[in-house]
C-alpha cells in the first residue's frame, strides 16, 4: 500500500507539471484529493490494516496528501500569474489610437470668445490691454476713484471683504489709477478681468467679467468718447447700429452717461407684424455700458505723475462681458454661462 501511495504522489506531480490552466489544476485536485479519490480512500482503509502497518501507511498517506495539496496550490499560483499576464496583453488598450467615436473638438467658452472680440476691437482703435489684481485694497477700489465714504458699494453686504482694507475688486476700474501711476499721459488702455459682487439672480452672479476702458490725453472731449463707443458698437453688433448717451451718475466720471445701442431685433421697438419687441421692450434701444469723462478728482490723485486736471482730460467706460454676450447671442439667463450644460455651450462653436 505504501508503494501505491508513492506512485499516486508521483502521478500527481507529473500531471500538475503539464497542467495548462487553473481549471485543469482543480480537476487534478478532485482526482487525487476529492472524496471519491483513491488516496483519501486508502486513508480510510488504514484502520483495517494489521497494527504494525497502520503507522507507516497512515504517515505516508498523510504526507502524500499534504505534498499533493501544496504542489497543486503552487502550480495554481503560477498559472494564475501567467493567465493574468495573458489577459493583460490580450485586453490591452492602445491609448495612442483615436477614440471611437471621435471626441468633440474643444472650443472657447462664449465669455472668452466675447472678451477676445472686444479686445480685438479696441486694439484696432489704438488701445492697449492691461490686467490687474483681483484682490484689491479699499484705497484703489474706492478712495482713489472718488467714491464717497457712504457709497453703498462699500457696505459689507454688497462687497466681498477679506479684511477692513482688502477686498475682492468690485470692478476693474482700480487699474485706472495703477496704470496712471506707472505711466505719464497719454494713456489708452482697456482692462478685462473677473470682478466680484454680492449679487445673484437672472442677470447677476457673484463673479462676472468686466472690461474697463480709459483714455487720457490733451484735448479729449465727450465727442471722442461717443465716436469710440460708436465704432465699438458697430464692430460688435453690426455696421447699422447707432448709439445714444443718457445722463447718469458714476463716482469717477463727470459728466457721466449711460450708453445704449439701437436694437438689432426690431425697428423702433416694433418687430415684423407690428408686435412689441421683446428684447428692447419696445424702446428700440438696449443698454450696453456706463461711461463718462474722467472726474478731475481722479486725475488729481495721480497729478504728480503728469495728470494735471488743468492740462489733460480723459474718458472712461465699463461694460460687463456677459451683458454684451447676452445681448449679441440672445441669452436669457446669465447663469447659463456657468452651468456648464454642453447643450448650451455647443451652440456657440
Image (cartoon, helix red, strand yellow):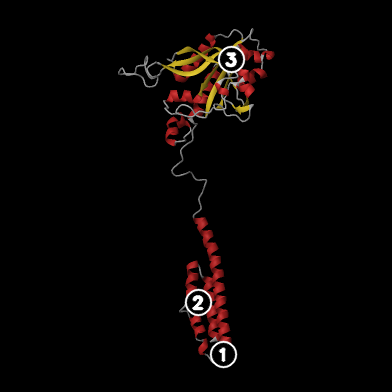
Camera-nearest residue between 290 and 114? 290
Q: CA distance from mark 2 to mark 1?
A: 22 Å
Which mark, residue 33?
Answer: 2
Q: Position of residue 83 (x, y in %)?
A: 52, 62
Can see residue 302? yes
Q: Is residue 305 left or right of residue 51?
A: right
Earlier-in-chain disc, 3 versus 2 = 2
Earlier-in-chain disc, 1 versus 3 = 1
Establish if 30 lies above or below 294. Answer: below
SS type, badge 2? helix
Establish if 4 lies above or below 129. Answer: below
Instruction: Check disc 3 and report the residue beneath it.
Output: 215
Camera-nearest residue between 184 and 289? 289
- Tell me the quarter of the image containing the C terminus: top left
Camera-nearest residue between 16 and 281? 281
The residue positioned 46% from the left and 40% from the top of the image is 103
Q: Position of residue 21 (x, y in %)?
A: 50, 67
SS type, badge 3? strand
Q: CA distance from mark 3 to mark 2?
A: 95 Å
Q: Can you name the residue that lies furthest to the front here? A: 150
Q: CA distance from mark 1 to mark 3?
A: 114 Å
Amino acid at each position: 500500500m505504501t508503494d501505491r501511495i508513492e506512485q499516486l504522489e508521483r502521478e500527481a506531480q507529473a500531471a500538475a507539471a503539464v497542467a495548462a490552466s487553473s481549471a485543469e489544476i482543480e480537476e487534478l485536485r478532485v482526482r487525487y484529493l476529492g472524496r471519491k479519490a483513491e488516496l483519501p480512500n486508502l486513508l480510510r482503509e488504514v484502520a483495517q490494516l494489521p497494527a504494525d502497518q497502520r503507522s507507516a501507511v497512515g504517515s505516508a498517506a498523510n504526507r502524500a496528501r499534504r505534498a499533493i495539496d501544496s504542489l497543486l496550490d503552487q502550480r495554481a499560483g503560477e498559472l494564475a500569474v501567467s493567465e493574468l499576464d495573458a489577459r493583460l496583453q490580450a485586453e490591452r488598450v492602445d491609448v495612442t489610437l483615436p477614440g471611437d467615436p471621435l471626441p468633440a473638438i474643444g472650443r472657447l467658452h462664449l465669455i472668452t470668445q466675447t472678451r477676445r472680440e472686444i479686445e480685438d476691437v479696441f486694439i484696432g482703435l489704438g488701445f492697449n490691454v492691461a490686467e490687474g489684481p483681483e484682490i484689491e485694497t479699499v484705497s484703489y477700489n474706492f478712495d482713489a476713484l472718488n467714491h464717497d465714504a457712504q457709497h453703498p458699494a462699500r457696505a459689507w453686504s454688497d462687497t466681498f471683504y477679506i479684511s477692513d482694507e482688502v477686498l475682492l475688486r468690485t470692478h476693474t476700474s482700480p487699474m485706472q489709477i495703477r496704470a496712471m501711476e506707472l505711466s505719464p499721459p497719454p494713456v489708452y488702455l482697456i482692462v478685462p478681468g473677473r470682478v466680484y459682487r454680492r449679487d445673484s439672480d437672472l442677470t447677476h452672479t457673484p463673479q462676472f467679467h468686466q472690461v474697463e476702458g480709459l483714455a487720457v490725453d490733451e484735448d479729449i472731449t465727450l465727442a471722442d468718447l461717443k465716436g469710440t463707443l460708436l465704432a465699438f458698437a458697430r464692430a460688435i453688433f453690426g455696421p447699422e447700429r447707432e448709439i445714444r448717451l443718457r445722463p447718469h451718475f458714476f463716482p469717477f466720471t463727470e459728466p457721466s452717461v449711460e450708453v445704449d445701442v439701437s436694437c438689432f431685433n426690431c425697428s423702433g421697438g416694433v418687430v415684423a407684424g407690428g408686435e412689441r419687441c421683446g428684447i428692447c421692450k419696445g424702446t428700440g434701444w438696449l443698454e450696453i455700458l456706463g461711461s463718462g469723462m474722467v472726474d478731475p478728482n481722479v486725475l488729481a490723485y495721480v497729478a504728480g505723475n503728469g495728470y494735471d486736471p488743468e492740462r489733460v482730460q480723459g474718458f472712461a467706460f465699463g461694460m460687463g462681458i456677459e451683458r454684451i454676450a447676452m445681448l449679441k447671442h440672445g441669452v436669457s439667463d446669465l447663469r447659463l454661462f456657468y452651468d456648464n450644460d454642453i447643450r448650451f455651450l455647443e451652440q456657440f462653436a
